[in-house]
Image (cartoon, grey):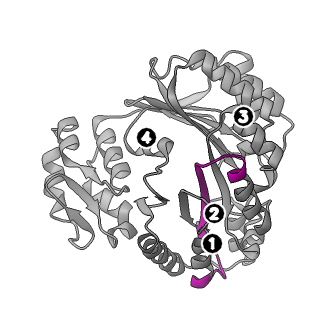
Amino acid sequence: MAGIYIHIPFCKQACTYCNFYFSTSSYFKNNFITALAKEIAMQSHYLSEEEIKTVYFGGGTPSILETQELEYLLTELSKHFSFAENLEICLEANPDDLTPLKLKALKQLGINRLSIGIQSFKESDLLFMKRSHTAKEALQCIEQARIEGFDNLSIDLIYGIPEQSNEDWLGNLNRLEGLGINHLSCYALTVEDNTPLYHDIRKGKIKALDEDLAAEHFKILRNWSKSEHWEHYEISNLCKEGNYSRHNTAYWNDEKYLGLGPGAHSYNGKERQWNVPNLKYYIEALKENKLQFEKESLSEANQFNERIMTSIRTMWGIDKNLLKSKFPKYFPYFEKQIAFLDGDSIINTDRHLILSDEGKFYADGIAAKLFIED
């Protein structure tokens, strides 16, 4: 089983914090759709005829696409890949795109999961981040999605926003009650190079972000998830009643995936490749039947380190038996390194190594102590 990720590189406007590849101009949209269909055909061999269990439209803002454009892309995918019977098709969306008419059309198209970029239910937060929707639209689109029969809904929220108090953040979380949301992705606001936020901080227009505030908000998230019975199954992801993100969980479980579109990444177990993040270059290359990507062959040490990094972030942790069977050469080193970890940061059982609540704050550093030098 494998997954397909499709990067739709268009947005109405630039959010202050975003460093994903996108364009605020739709000038090349028609040419992009044509190029993407060609890439689908040319990459049909990549997953070695594995059955596809998830299709994920990410971005950018995939909900910008017209329904007929999404239908065309799904049809092209079905020509070249074998879909699992219980295929999950997820679309990332902005609230202002999810009109009742658009939602009805998406449902009829077969899209059965929405990942909605709410980010905050507070108007001042949305204005600070330069989001294209209002707090009212955030609530309206969720209600309308449920009316149209979408029962697999995920939303994104951001914490650590300047002037966002502990009460504000907890209020965002408590706002979920009764909305019918079964999955939640929460991210700390971070400063990425060359984003509007980065430049505003450098110019002194905005004060530097407060890491202590973000840490406090993460504690609030952790405690809220326990009291409200949400599974905090990955550091940035929570769900109700086992409603894990099937697409992202596949990443953490080392499953294969194909990325399509400019800047998209692919992984086949032994190699990682990524398309050049340039829309015009992407289109021109495919006009000439060329695939423009960079590739990295993963050494055994690379594969070991990636397995450590991804699995340790989840509530299931590192499965020692699986690690030993796949990497017998490195497993003794792994066992030896565990002794150097802070005992308060880990839960070390016979079968698993799992981060404690405290350890979740230091996931990257703990993983680094278990890495093999290549």
Label 2 sits on residue: 179
Mark 1 — residue?
175
Q: Which residue is mark 4?
A: 250
Disc 2 versus disc 3: distance between alpha carbons? 22 Å
Q: What percent of the width, then of the height, locates residue 313?
A: 37, 56
Mark 4 neighbour density, 10 Å: few (under 14) some (14–19) many (20 or more)? some
Q: Residue at x 63, y 74 (%)?
A: 161
Q: Is residue 335 left or right of residue 307?
A: left
Q: Quadrant of residue 352?
A: bottom left
Q: Identify the amino acid type marked 2.
A: Leu
> What distance separates the C-alpha of mark 2 from that of mark 1?
8 Å
Query: Which residue corresponds to mark 3?
Result: 108
Nearer to us: label 3 or label 1? 3
Instruction: Identify which amino acid the numbered label 4 is placed on.
Output: Ala
Image quarter hosting the N terminus: top left
Which contiguous range is marked in magenta?
145-167
State if disc 1 and disc 2 touch (CB < 8 Å): yes
Query: Where's the C terminus, which quadrant?
Result: top left
Q: Earlier in the sequence, mark 4 or mark 3?
A: 3
Compare marks 2 and 3 and give the one earlier in the sequence: 3
